[in-house]
Image: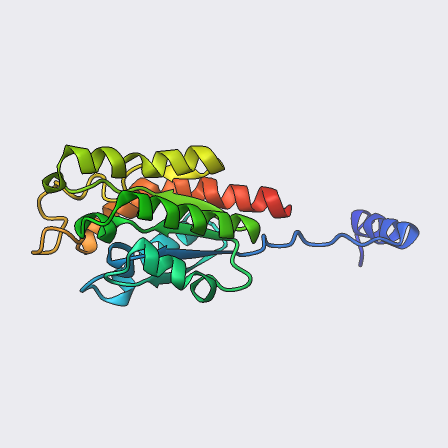
Amino acid sequence: MRTLFTSLLIAGGILSGVWPVAAQAPREVKIVVLGDSLSAGYQLPAADAFPAKLQAALRARGQAVSIENAGVSGDTSTGGLERLDWSVGDGTDAVILQLGANDALRGLDPAITRRNLDTIVEKLKQRQIDVLLAGMLAPPNMGSAYAGAFNPIFTDLATKYGLILDPFFLDGVMTVAGLSLPDGMHPNARGVDVMVQRILPKVEELIAAVRARRGG
């Protein structure tokens, strides 16, 4: 036997011609991490790489997101630019741009790094893809003159294009014992955990920017 409340609900639906519709789940945000060995997961199982752990952490926080690992060990900003179109496929909403470390390690002209990263960002913007720029610092052995030309690249580009900036991708890991592989340069699984937790607010800001741009 129907209750009075149920009957009223049914009658209301019939009279208005509209039935309540369940709220739709938010559309998934697709992020590509375009980077080098620091994000690719050098000498780590695939599940311990930065993109995989970042995706898991975001989903645990209720974010509908998928993150693709487009990191290539040894890649420079030149390599990233050359493979941009096929590494960042159609349907990508946002990119975490993590390149430049190998440029500095090899002592490449910072002007080349700046030009390559600028071009990558410009191309992504033309495709309406939001960008989180992961910064890097020149190794101390490269000297102050080199650092003076290299280090400002990331802040300058973030200011120019209005990007979300993570000033130093390895912050909290590079100089902390027990968070790097024996080579002292690449994060181990614990190091990746630290990186993920530190950058989470920036990535959630990136996701919010995507949802605001596309309206959900």
Q: Which quarter of the picture shows residue 174?
A: top left
**Going 13% across and 37% down the picture, which residue do you hit?**
143
Residue 37 x/y as whole percent: 24, 59
Asked if residue 190 lies left or right of residue 199, the reply is left
Asked if residue 151 lies left or right of residue 14, the reply is left
Q: Which of 199/121 is in front? A: 121
Q: Which quarter of the picture shows residue 31?
A: bottom left
Residue 116 x/y as whole percent: 38, 50
**Going 45% across and 67% down the picture, which residue do you hit?**
86
Residue 120 x/y as whole percent: 43, 51
**Going 9% across and 41% down the picture, which residue do you hit?**
141
Residue 162 x/y as whole percent: 48, 35
Look at the image and tell me whether residue 114 can be seen.
yes
Q: Which quarter of the picture shows residue 68?
A: bottom left
Look at the image and tell me whether residue 216 can be seen.
no
Q: Give the position of the N terminus as an image quadrant.
A: bottom right
**Going 40% across and 50% down the picture, which residue do you hit?**
96
28 vs 158: above or below: below
74 vs 96: above or below: below
